[in-house]
Image (tube, grey):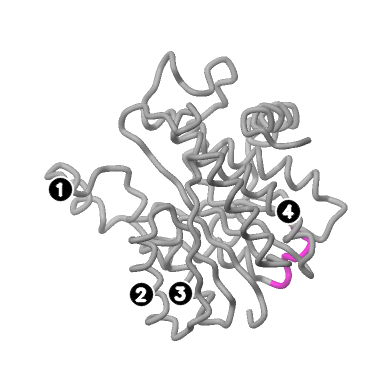
Amino acid sequence: MHGKTVLITGANAGMGLASTIKLAAEGAKVIMLCRNLERGNEARKEAQQQSGSTAIELMQCDLGDIASIKNFAQEFLKKYDTLDILLNNAGVVTIRRQETKDGFERVLGVNHLGHFLLTNLLLPSLQAAEQGRIVTVASGAYKAGRIHFDDLFLKQSFNPAKAYAQSKLANILFTKELARQLSNTKVTANCVHPGAVATQIGVNRDTGFGKRIVALLKPFFLTPEKGAETALYVATEPSLHNVSGQYFYKKQQQLLPAKATNDYDALRLWGWSSELTGLET
C-alpha cells in the first residue's frame, strides 16, 4: 500500500477507524473524512498510535450537507492529484424521521445521496490513479428494502428499518450504474456487506435502553476489525483489478435478486440523485 492514497468516510469510529488503522499500518496515506472535528482528532490520534503511521490526515465534511460536500471536494482536488481508493463507509440510522440541511430524509440523504455526490465529484482524482477503486459499504438489509420512487423521502410512512433498507438498496443500485458508466476506464466500483457489526447498532448508547440493547446483542456481532475485512479485501486485492459492479460478502461475490440489478431502477435513481444534488451531467 506504500504510495497509495486512501479516503475513508465515517473514519472516526467502527469499521472506518479499523480500516484507517489497517491501511495506514500497511503504508498507505489515509485521509479520514469526518463530520465532527473533535471526534475526528481523537480518532486520528488513536489511529496513529495503533498503526505507527503519521501519514494520516483529518479532513472535515458533512455528508448531509451538499455545500459541505462540494467545498470538501474542491479542497481535496486542489491538494491531491490522485486518489487510489475511496471507501464509502459512513452511515446513519435514525429512530425518528429527520431531514438534512437540504431537506432530504436523513438516512437516504447521508447513506446514498451524500456518497453519490462525493464519489462523482472525486472521480477526476480516481481516474488519475493507476487503478482507482471505489468501495461502498452496503448491507444485507437491502433484502427488506425497495426504492420508494413515489415517496423517496418517506414523508407518507417512515420507520427506521424501511429507511435503512431503502438506503442500502440504493447503495447497490448506485454501484451498479456507476460501474457501467466507468466500464471504459481504469476505475472500478463495488459494494460490500460487512456482516452485522457491533458499532452499527442504530440506538442511542447514552440512554439506559440503548446500553441494555448493546450489551444484549454485542456478543452476536462482529468486531469492527472483522466487519472491515471484506471492504479492505475488495479495496486492495490485486486479482480484483478488473472486477466492477459486484456485491461482496465474506470476500466472495454474491448473486443479487432482480430488484438489486434492475437497470431501469438504477438509471432512474441516478437521474433523481443527480437532479437533487445538483450534479452536473
Q: CA distance from mark 4 to mark 2?
A: 30 Å
> Residue 79, percent across and down?
65, 66
Q: Name which residue type carries label 4.
A: Leu
Give the SS element for disc 2: helix
- In the image, residue 47 sits, relative to residue 193, either above or below, namely below
Q: Which residues are magenta?
A: 238-243
Q: Considering depth in this image, is 157 or 126 the residue closer to the camera?
A: 126
Q: Which residue is mark 3?
A: 21
Q: Are marks 3 and 2 in contact (CB under 8 Å)?
A: yes
Res 156 → quadrant: top left
Q: Name which residue type carries label 1.
A: Arg
- Residue at the extreme right of the image, as rendered: 184
Q: Which residue is mark 1?
A: 212
Q: CA distance from mark 4 to mark 3?
A: 25 Å
Q: Which residue is mark 4?
A: 123
Q: Which residue is mark 2?
A: 46
Give the SS element for disc 3: helix
Image quarter (top left, top right, bottom left or bottom right) of the C terminus: top right
Residue drawn at point x = 80 percent, y = 50 percent? 182
Closer to the camera: disc 4 or disc 3? 4
Q: CA distance from mark 3 to mark 1?
A: 29 Å
Closer to the camera: disc 4 or disc 1? 4
Position of 199 with respect to 247 (left or right) is left
Closer to the camera: disc 3 or disc 2? 2
Residue drawn at point x = 70 percent, y = 37 percent? 279
Ranked by sequence position, the earlier of labels 3 and 2 is 3
Residue drawn at point x = 56 percent, y = 36 percent? 169
- In the image, residue 83 sits, relative to residue 184, either above or below, namely below
Ranked by sequence position, the earlier of labels 4 and 3 is 3
User: Crowding near pointer 3: few (<14 within 10 Å), some, many (20+)?
Assistant: many
